[in-house]
Image (cartoon, helix red, strand yellow):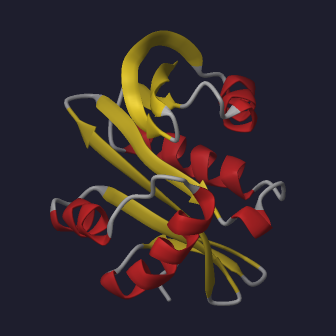
């Protein structure tokens, strides 16, 4: 399987085209404005750091990160809503942080909706700090929503 991390029946491995149908299903269950298959294909095509977390060969979550010039950027991290609260989001974030360090990044950045209190709590608990705001960054049900920019010095 060439897993990066294996624990019992859970594995963290590279994302592949064959995962995209399941990833899109999770994306649509988790987000009101999900990424498209084209976005995921572009991330794979350009060589972004794309991984899936699976349990018993079923994708439960995934993460996408870019890295360049000493800076890593978490672009998407998601755990299926039915599997949230089990520590898998933290596992994915911890893995991305370790990977960013290994790739030579000095800082890791991400955007998060201010309304996503659970994610913000997780990021703060890990050590991310708010460094700015992107106005009208996310599409929303009633217009646009700002994004908090969070950073972690590595």
Return the residue nearer the eye: 36 or 122.
36
Q: Residue furthest front?
A: 142
Residue 58 appears left or right of 1: right
Indicate whether 62 appears above or below 149: below
Q: Residue furthest top?
A: 131
Residue 108 appears left or right of 31: left
Residue 4, visible in the rendered structure = no
Indicate whether 24 appears above or below 152: below
Count of numbered marks: 0
Q: Residue at x 79, y 54 (%)?
A: 87
- Percent position of residue 36, x then y: 33, 65
- Location of residue 49 (image quadrant): bottom left
Q: Residue furthest right?
A: 86
- Percent position of residue 114, x then y: 60, 24
Q: Residue at x 42, y 28 (%)?
A: 109
Q: Residue at x 72, y 34 (%)?
A: 122
Residue 85, visible in the rendered structure = yes
Residue 116 appears left or right of 18: right
Return the residue nearer the eye: 117 or 53.
117
- Percent position of residue 62, x then y: 52, 63
Q: Residue at x 67, y 66 (%)?
A: 80
Indicate whether 132 appears above or below 72: above
Return the residue nearer the eye: 72 or 130.
130
């Amino acid at each position: 399987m060439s897993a990066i991390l294996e624990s019992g029946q859970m594995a963290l491995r590279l994302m592949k085209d064959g995962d995209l149908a399941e990833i899109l299903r999770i994306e649509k269950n988790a987000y009101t404005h999900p990424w498209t298959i084209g976005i995921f294909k572009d991330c794979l095509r350009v060589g972004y750091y794309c991984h899936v977390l699976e349990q018993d060969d079923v994708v439960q979550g995934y993460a996408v990160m870019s890295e360049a010039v000493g800076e890593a950027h978490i672009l998407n991290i998601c755990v299926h809503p039915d599997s949230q609260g089990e520590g898998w989001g933290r596992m994915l974030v911890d893995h991305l942080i370790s990977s960013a360090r290994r790739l030579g990044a000095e800082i890791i950045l991400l955007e998060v909706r201010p309304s996503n209190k659970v994610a913000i709590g997780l990021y703060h608990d890990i050590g991310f700090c708010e460094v700015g705001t992107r106005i009208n960054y996310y599409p929303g049900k009633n217009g646009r929503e700002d994004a908090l920019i969070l950073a972690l010095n590595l």
